[in-house]
Image (cartoon, rainbow, N blue to C red):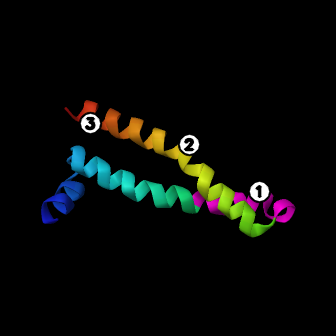
Amino acid sequence: MNNILTNLAIGDINLITEFVLLLIAIPLSMLGGAIGGILLAGKDFGYDFSAMMGSLLAPAGVIPGVIIGLVMIYILAN
């Protein structure tokens, strides 16, 4: 665990740190999608339904972008 935190702190990107960053990005994208759903369609469809749909659909766009970004960082760093 200490090695993973050290690699994250110094910016060393390897397979383990990419998975850790992806696991951090998923809940953050769900939270952002829920907030966006509430702001966009809260009055029309209800706040609970809008938050649920936003949190389910937001990772569909965020996760591929995060994976492509991490691969590009890995390629450019080496």
Residue bounds of the magenta highlight: 32-45
Residue at x 29% of width, y 47% of height: 18
Q: How crowded is mark 2: few (under 14 residues within 10 Å), some or many (20 or more)?
A: few
Q: Position of residue 38 (x, y in %)?
A: 72, 63
Q: Kindly report the secondary structure that dominates the magenta region of the rendered protein.
A: helix
Q: Which amino acid does label 3 sit on?
A: Tyr
Q: How crowded is mark 3: few (under 14 residues within 10 Å), some or many (20 or more)?
A: some
Q: Which of 51 and 36 is in front in this view?
A: 51
Of label 3 and label 1, which has the lower sequence position? 1
Magenta region includes residue 69: no
Q: Which amino acid does label 2 sit on?
A: Gly
Q: Residues within 10 Å of mark 1 (few under 14, many from 20)?
A: some
**Quick check: 25 left or right of 58?**
left
**Taking the image as drawn, is residue 13 in sight?**
no
Task: Please tell me whether mark 3 sits on a helix, a strand or a loop.
Answer: helix
Q: Mark 1 points at which residue?
A: 40
| Structural distance between the alpha carbons of marks 1 and 2 | 17 Å
Residue 65 drawn above or below residue 33: above
Q: What residue type is labelled 1?
A: Leu
Of label 1 and label 2, which has the lower sequence position? 1
Of label 2 and label 3, which has the lower sequence position? 2
Q: Mark 2 points at which residue?
A: 61
Task: Please tell me whether mark 1 sits on a helix, a strand or a loop.
Answer: helix
Quadrant of res 6: bottom left
| Structural distance between the alpha carbons of marks 3 and 1 | 35 Å
Q: Mark 3 points at which residue?
A: 74
Residue 28 drawn above or below residue 69: below
Magenta region includes residue 43: yes
Q: Position of residue 45 (x, y in %)?
A: 83, 61
Q: Where is residue 40 in the image (x, y as percent from the top left)?
A: 76, 56
| Structural distance between the alpha carbons of marks 2 and 3 | 21 Å
For residue 70, which numbered disc appears in the image?
A: none
